[in-house]
Image (cartoon, rainbow, N blue to C red):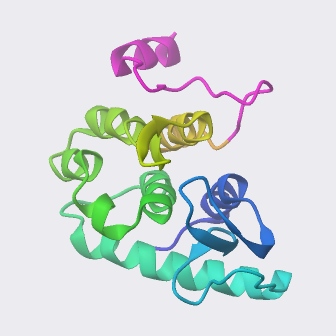
């Protein structure tokens, strides 16, 4: 499987594009669309074309483990949501996540809830809830369950937040 255009757009939305290297909220040097690694350094500048190339390369390395480790068929929307999550937290954390474990067990509602738990970042050596991650995870859960890639006007989708109950989400969507 490959990430769809809508899935790539979701990742781009949350990663943002920065053509000059910067330290993210956790202090990790980042450039382009969320590209990190030993090749990123202070003062580094890249072109838009290079940002796109790095994104495609990073997506390939982050999605291959999903495909390899899934024990059941995945829909495009599930794959896109997982690609976004995996891109953000890294393949080792994703593969060990409750979200992926629940998916493999066939528990889609439970997987969507578990996606929303990844809403924290280490800031000044403290694990803190980050509002941007709460929104991102809500969007990923919405895409995973319903294939709804659209955001609401207020920037918050009708999806589970950090503590929302998935049953309530399913009831609201069914109404």
- Image point (50%, 48%), residue name: 124
Give the number of marks: 0
Q: Who is closer to the viewer here, 56 or 135?
A: 135
Q: Who is closer to the viewer here, 19 or 97?
A: 19
- Residue farthest right in this picture: 47
Main SS of residues in magenta: loop
Tell me residue 74's x, y (percent).
34, 58
Q: Who is closer to the viewer here, 173 or 163?
A: 163
Residue 155 belongs to the span the image colors magenta: yes
Q: Is residue 16 left or right of residue 58?
A: right
Q: Is residue 92 left or right of residue 23?
A: left
User: Picture quarter containing residue 169?
Assistant: top left
Quarter of the image for the N terminus: give it: bottom left
> Does any portion of residue 174 appear in the rendered image?
yes
Q: Is residue 31 left or right of residue 46?
A: left
- Image point (40%, 66%), residue name: 90
Residue 36 belongs to the span the image colors magenta: no
> Does any portion of residue 145 appear in the rendered image?
no
- Image point (31%, 75%), residue name: 65
- Residue farthest front in this picture: 124
Q: Is residue 122 left or right of residue 22?
A: left
Tell me residue 173's x, y (percent).
51, 19
- Image point (56%, 76%), residue name: 36
Q: Indicate whether 124 appears above or below 61.
A: above
Q: Magenta region: which residues? A: 150-175
């Amino acid at each position: 499987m490959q990430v769809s255009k809508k899935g790539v757009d979701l990742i781009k939305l949350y990663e943002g594009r920065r053509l000059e290297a910067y330290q993210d909220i956790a202090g990790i040097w980042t450039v382009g669309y969320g590209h990190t690694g030993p090749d990123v350094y202070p003062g580094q500048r890249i072109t838009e074309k290079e940002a796109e190339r790095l994104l495609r390369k990073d997506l390939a390395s982050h999605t291959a483990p999903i495909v390899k480790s899934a024990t059941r068929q995945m829909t495009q929307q599930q794959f896109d949501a997982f690609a976004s999550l995996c891109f953000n937290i890294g393949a080792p954390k994703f593969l060990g996540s409750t979200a992926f474990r629940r998916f493999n067990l066939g528990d889609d509602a439970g997987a969507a809830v578990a996606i929303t738990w990844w809403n924290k970042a280490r800031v000044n050596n403290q694990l803190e809830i980050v509002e941007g991650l709460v929104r991102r995870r809500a969007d990923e859960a919405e895409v995973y369950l319903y294939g709804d890639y659209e955001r609401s006007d207020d920037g918050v989708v009708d999806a589970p937040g950090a503590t929302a109950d998935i049953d309530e989400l399913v009831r609201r969507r069914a109404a």
